[in-house]
Image (tube, rainbow, N blue to C red):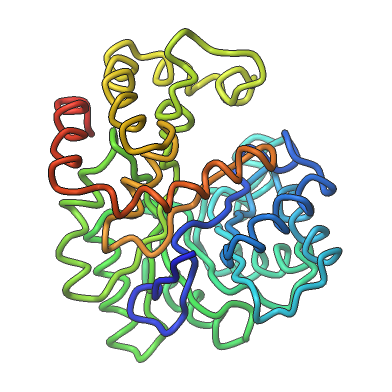
């Protein structure tokens, strides 16, 4: 395993990490989570990503129960959570004021306590503002995140899917007041979604030392090649709560591009999924690529992507770019 500093911090995270979105509670129970966390840890993974909204809190509960069973020393792993969506989606928005879709101080200070209870931990290592909130003054949000860290409930904070301008504003506010600054951003990043990471955020790497913990390296499974012939049973695209992904997963043009990538992966001695994960990991601004898995075999295969990173020569990268040209956003 390779380890990289998270932004300008001294914290080092594994180049590949394990996330829980979609899988935990929906596909993975506590017993399976123990098996996969153990396998990932044995392979050198030290960062495990989560969020309050994943399975409406159940994902944090499962990961927390698994960590308790594994009994690892707390210094041996890094855990994250994210706040914005809330976990109360069963009532109309007007009945859930200050309980979801916000980054105001009241919500944030109670959300962290809820996550810590579900995890069974006294602190998380990383905490993210899961989306920007245009209805809350950014200074209120930044101060609340600073206070969360000062209280010892989190060690570092960052953003997820924030525009570059908003990240810079938050960083400058924190700098001006002597508060803890946002350290990292968690954006979607894969072969079909790259402009934000490669263009929009580019000045932030230089100016504020922004680190990245990227998600969806397989474009929700599209880049694994499994959707070239439709939506297979048991796949993410077949899940009822993932129906919004199906048009994207079965897009003919992008699946044709995946077909063009297949021989490149084979020549490098890897799978399509390994090629896609390695492509994301080879970016020097990416601290870690968050992978997902619903079983141990899939996890082991994904971690094999590291063997392909050094094989991505300029010539190979040019062939990959040619195969996907015109399909990026």
In the rendered image, which quarter is residue 207 located in? bottom left
Q: Nearer the viewer, residue 240 or 297?
A: 297
Residue 305: percent from left, percent from top: 44, 47
The residue sitting at 33% across, 40% down in the picture is 190
Left or right: 150 as drawn, with respect to 59: left
Q: Nearer the viewer, residue 254 or 277?
A: 277
Instruction: List the single residue furthest toward the bottom.
Output: 178
The residue sitting at 49% across, 47% down in the picture is 304
Q: Nearer the viewer, residue 32 or 312?
A: 312
The residue sitting at 54% across, 80% down in the picture is 155
Left or right: 232 as drawn, with respect to 283: right
Q: Is residue 24 visible?
A: yes
The residue sitting at 30% across, 70% down in the picture is 210
- Give the tally of numbered discs: 0
Q: Nearer the viewer, residue 109 or 192?
A: 192
**Can you say which quadrant of the picture contains the C terminus?**
top left
State whether residue 295 is above or below residue 305.
above
Left or right: 74 as drawn, with respect to 236: right
In the rendered image, which quarter is residue 24 located in? top right
Residue 118: percent from left, percent from top: 78, 61
State whether residue 129 is above or below residue 141.
above
Residue 255: percent from left, percent from top: 34, 17
Q: Is residue 135 visible?
A: no
Residue 198: percent from left, percent from top: 19, 51
State whether residue 217 is above or below residue 156.
above
């Amino acid at each position: 395993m390779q380890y990289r500093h998270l932004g300008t911090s001294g914290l080092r995270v594994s180049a590949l990490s394990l996330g829980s979105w979609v899988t935990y509670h929906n596909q993975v129970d506590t017993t399976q989570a123990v098996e996969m966390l153990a396998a990932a840890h044995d392979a050198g993974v030290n960062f495990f990503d989560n969020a309050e909204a994943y399975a409406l809190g159940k994902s944090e509960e499962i990961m927390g129960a698994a960590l308790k069973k594994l009994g690892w020393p707390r210094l041996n792993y890094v855990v994250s959570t994210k706040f914005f969506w809330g976990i109360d989606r069963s009532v109309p928005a007007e009945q859930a004021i200050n309980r979801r879709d916000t980054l105001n101080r009241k919500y944030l200070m109670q959300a962290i306590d809820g996550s810590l209870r579900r995890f069974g931990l006294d602190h998380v290592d990383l905490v993210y503002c899961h989306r920007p909130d245009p209805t809350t003054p950014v200074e209120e949000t930044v101060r609340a995140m600073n206070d969360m860290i000062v209280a010892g409930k989190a060690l570092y904070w960052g953003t997820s899917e924030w525009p570059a301008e908003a990240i810079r504003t938050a960083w400058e506010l924190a700098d001006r007041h002597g508060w803890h600054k946002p350290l990292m951003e968690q954006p979607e990043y894969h072969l079909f979604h790259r402009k934000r990471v490669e263009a929009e955020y580019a000045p932030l790497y230089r100016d504020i030392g922004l680190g990245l913990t990227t998600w969806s390296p397989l474009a929700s499974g599209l880049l694994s090649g499994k959707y070239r012939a439709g939506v297979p049973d048991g796949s993410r695209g077949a899940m009822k709560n993932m129906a919004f992904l199906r048009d994207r997963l079965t897009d003919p043009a992008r699946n044709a591009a995946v077909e063009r990538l297949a021989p490149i992966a084979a020549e490098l001695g890897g799978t399509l999924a390994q090629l896609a994960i390695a492509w994301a990991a080879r970016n020097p601004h990416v601290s870690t690529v968050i992978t997902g898995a619903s079983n141990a075999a899939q996890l082991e295969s994904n971690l094999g992507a590291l063997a392909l990173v050094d094989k991505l020569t300029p010539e190979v990268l040019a062939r990959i770019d040619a195969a996907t040209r015109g399909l990026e956003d």
